[in-house]
Image (spheres, rainbow, N blue to C red):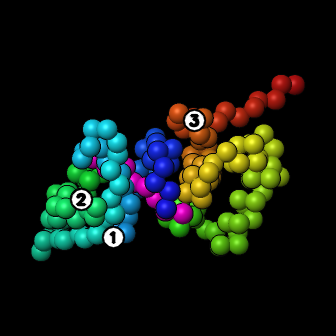
């Protein structure tokens, strides 16, 4: 799991991905609610519900007693760090081999020579690579080092 500052920043800026977060045990997140100087990493370890199926307690590992009252509170104070498999699941209607084929064609420029390896090659972990792939496939956004920008289509002039 990539817990680098770069990956945390990429995840934080991927607002579309953050909206898709539905808390599950085993999810990774980062928050600056514990330290003013750096993000603290968490692993969601427990979810308890009341008789009305409402969240009553969400335990976050790595900090004793750290918890959220409900999903909304967690989502407001934590940045979800999706794992590689969670990112791959966001690409719908695709088999594992289909994902590999599409990824290969993107990375090696068969589909979009403009991006290709020069773009995808700058990511240093599988989570960063798949996050960039999901953002491009689903939202037509590319990472510029600071945020996700919508890629403009080149208009051909006649």
Q: Earlier in the sequence, mark 2 or mark 1?
A: 1
Q: Would you say 42 lies left or right of 154 here?
A: left
Q: Nearer the viewer, residue 73 or 117?
A: 117
Which disc number belongs to residue 145? 3
Residue at the image position 78 percent from the left and 57 percent from the top: 105
Examine the rendering and report whether any part of residue 73 can be seen: yes
Would you place residue 120 above or below residue 85 in this image?
above
Residue 112 in sight in this render: no
Number of numbered discs? 3
- Front position among marks 2 and 1: 2
The magenta segment: 77-84
Residue 158 location, x and y as percent? 87, 25
List x then y, in percent, for residue 86: 49, 64
Residue 80 belongs to magenta span = yes
Residue topped by disc 2? 63
Q: Which badge, 3 or 1, comes first in the chain's sequence?
A: 1
- Assess disc 1: are there few (<14), some (14-19) or many (≥20) residues with their C-alpha within 10 Å of its C-alpha: few
**Which one is earlier in the sequence, the residue at label 2 or at label 3?**
2
In the figure, 49 relative to 16: above or below? below
Q: Is 15 displayed left or right of 71 in the figure?
A: right
Which secondary structure, mark 3? Answer: loop
Q: Please give the residue where the numbered disc 1 appears in the rendered image.
A: 25
Marks 2 and 3, how far apart at CA: 30 Å
Is 82 one of the magenta-colored residues?
Answer: yes
Determine crowd level at label 3: few under 14, some 14-19, many 20+ residues with C-alpha closer than 10 A: few
Q: Is residue 66 above or below residue 31?
A: below
Disc 3 from disc 1: Cα separation: 30 Å
> Nearer the observer, disc 2 or disc 3?
2
Given the current orientation, which residue lies at the most extreme top position?
Answer: 157
Spatial separation of the CA atoms under disc 2 and disc 1: 16 Å
- The answer to which image quadrant residue 99 occupies is bottom right
Q: Position of residue 126 (x, y in %)?
A: 60, 59
């Amino acid at each position: 799991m990539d817990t680098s500052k770069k990956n945390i920043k990429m995840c934080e800026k991927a607002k579309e991905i953050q909206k898709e977060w539905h808390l599950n045990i085993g999810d990774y997140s980062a928050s600056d609610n514990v330290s003013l100087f750096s993000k603290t990493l968490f692993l969601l370890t427990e979810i308890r519900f009341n008789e009305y199926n409402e969240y009553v307690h969400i335990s976050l590992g790595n900090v004793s007693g750290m918890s959220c009252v409900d999903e909304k509170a967690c989502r407001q104070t934590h940045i979800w760090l999706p794992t590689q498999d969670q990112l791959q699941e966001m690409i719908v209607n695709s088999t594992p081999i289909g994902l590999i084929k599409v990824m290969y064609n993107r990375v090696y420029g068969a589909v979009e020579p403009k991006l290709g390896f020069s773009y995808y090659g700058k990511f240093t972990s599988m989570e960063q690579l798949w996050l960039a792939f999901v953002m491009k496939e689903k939202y037509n956004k590319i990472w510029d080092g600071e945020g996700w920008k919508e890629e403009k289509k080149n208009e051909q002039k006649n």
